Amino acid sequence: MITSSCKSDLLSESKKEKITELNNKAVEMRMTGELSEAEKLYEQAFKIDNTNLSIHSSLLGIYIQKDEIKRAFDFLEDLPEKLKKTDYYFQTKGNLLEYDGKIKEAKEQYKKALELSDIGTIRNEQDLNRLVNYTMLETFAGYKDKAVNRINDVLKFDWLTNDNKEFLETFRNEFEYYQGNGALDFQNKKIIKICTKNLDSLKQILRRNHINITGSSFPIDKNERAEIRIKEKYRSGIEVLGISECD
């Protein structure tokens, strides 16, 4: 019995190493645009362990890149039944529905995923990513006020560094101005340009009013104006402040 157990453990470690090897090669292929080759490697890895959600998610990403949405849905439904009762299944289904333009249906899946999720206690820096992931799901499920308040509560923690605060504020602002379009809300499709001769002052004003800056440019000549770029979703915020777009 002891010998058998050791062999089983060795086999398990061997499988893990093989999956890691295949995954690393697939990542390289994907980065160079060789999607079909990356797909084959991910498929090999998933055959070794069809409960590996990291590999599953990577394969779904390949299908989306190749615009094979039906194949992505079918692949999700092929998960073992026990995994189709998890937050991963419902959140991923929401992602796919959103990609397919079905925002309302996606929202219902996010709600189901949220019911199965647990935020836990935020004790240190390592927990902040979990906080952001949970509040993003809350926002997509239609509870953006809860998400914003949750982050605001954590922002009061005295152990947060300035980088921690900036990280959380960025997402808090995105959620506060969320327009109900899922992940599309985070894309920079339409940009508002604001011109100013006092760049630092305007940046501070925007930050105090929870408006994220997408980018900025400094004037070449001292008499020229600097430019700040923000997403269209923040238009209501700058209108309240009486700030206008560049002429």
Image (cartoon, rainbow, N blue to C red):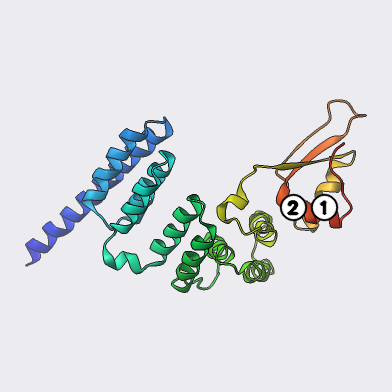
Proximity of marks 1 and 2: CB atoms separated by less than 8 Å: yes
Quadrant of the snapshot with the C terminus: top right
In the drawing, does residue 125 fall left or right of residue 76? right
Q: Amino acid at mark 1?
A: Ile
Q: For the residue carrying disc 2, how many other residues have a C-alpha within 10 Å: few (<14), some (14-19), or many (20+)?
A: many
Whole-percent x, y for residue 64 in the image: 42, 44
Question: Observer-nearest residue: 106 or 187?
Answer: 106
Question: Observer-nearest residue: 182 or 26?
Answer: 182
In the drawing, does residue 3 fall left or right of residue 18? left
Q: Residue sitting at 28 percent across and 39 percent down?
A: 41
Question: Observer-nearest residue: 104 or 163?
Answer: 104
Whole-percent x, y for residue 180 in the image: 62, 59
Q: Amino acid at mark 2?
A: Tyr
**Rendered image: mark on residue 186:** none
Residue that carries the numbered disc 1 in the rendered image: 238
Q: Residue sitting at 87 percent across and 49 percent down?
A: 243
Spatial CA span between label 1 and label 2? 7 Å
Q: Residue sitting at 55 percent across and 69 percent down?
A: 123
Residue lying farthest right? 223
Q: For the residue carrying disc 1, how many other residues have a C-alpha within 10 Å: few (<14), some (14-19), or many (20+)?
A: some
Residue that carries the numbered disc 2 in the rendered image: 234
| Secondary element at image label 2 | helix
Dividing the picture into quarters, in which one does residue 181 lie?
bottom right
Residue lying farthest top? 221
| Secondary element at image label 1 | helix
Dividing the picture into quarters, in which one does residue 147 lie?
bottom right
Image height check: is 11 above or below 22?
A: below
Image height check: is 175 above or below 17?
A: below
